[in-house]
Each structure stands twice: as structure tokens, then as C-alpha cells.
Amino acid sequence: MVFFFTAKGQPVADILPFKRPSPKDKAKGKTLCRSNLHKWVVDKEKVFDVKQGKLVTTYICSRCGKTKIKAH
């Protein structure tokens, strides 16, 4: 490691080691959704659709945030 010092003997900056994320860390939680295997969770906020005038169930993927609506 190389350190640079000013005229007063103080270090210029702290040099931090850089670690690249592994491919496993970069793709974590995305590969299943790309294969259309979402983790659907029921959204309890929106129950009634005003435009259709029907009760609906809104599903949200907990990994990627994609929404799916099912009318009853």
C-alpha cells in the first residue's frame, strides 16, 4: 500500500480497499423473477377497483415489486 503525506507529515487521505461484488451477490433476488417465479404477497391497501366496480386482490412481488391484479 502506498501512502502520500503532506509537507507537515499528515496523510492526504485514507485509502480504502475496494472489493467488487461477486456475480452471486449482484444477481441475488433477481434471477427467480426473471424466470417468472415471483414471490407474490397480498397487498391489503387496495381492495376495491373504482374503474371496474369490483372487488380485486392485488398481489405484489416481495423481491422485485411487480404487481398483479386478480378480479373476483
Image (tube, rainbow, N blue to C red):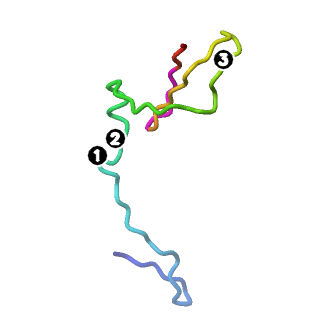
In the rendered image, residue 29, in percent from the top left (x then y), is placed at 37, 40
Amino acid on which the number 3 mark rests in the picture: Asp
Do the CB atoms of the residues marked 3 and 1 lie less than 8 Å apart? Answer: no
Q: Position of residue 6 (x, y in %)?
A: 53, 83
| Whole-number angstrom distance, CA of label 3 to CA of label 1 | 40 Å
Q: Quadrant of residue 46?
A: top right
Residue 17 sits above or below residue 38 on the image: below
Question: At 35% across and 59% down in the image, what residue appears?
Answer: 19
For the residues carrying marks 2 and 3, which lies nearer the camera in this image? 3
Report the front residue among 9 and 67. Answer: 67
Q: What whole-number distance in Å separates the C-alpha atoms at marks 2 and 3?
A: 35 Å
Horizontal and vertical percent position of residue 8: 56, 90
Looking at the image, which residue is at 50% across and 82% down? Answer: 11
Q: How far apart are the two marked residues, 2 and 1, measured between alpha carbons?
A: 5 Å
Q: Earlier in the sequence, mark 2 or mark 3?
A: 2
Per the image, label 3 sits on a secondary structure element best described as strand
| Rendered position, 29 above or below 51 | below
Q: Which residue is the site of mark 3?
A: 49
Residue 61 is one of the magenta-drawn residues: no
Count of picture labels: 3
Could you say where residue 32 lies in the image, as x and y percent from the top left?
32, 32
- Assign the N terminus to one quadrant of the image: bottom left
Magenta span of residues: 63-68
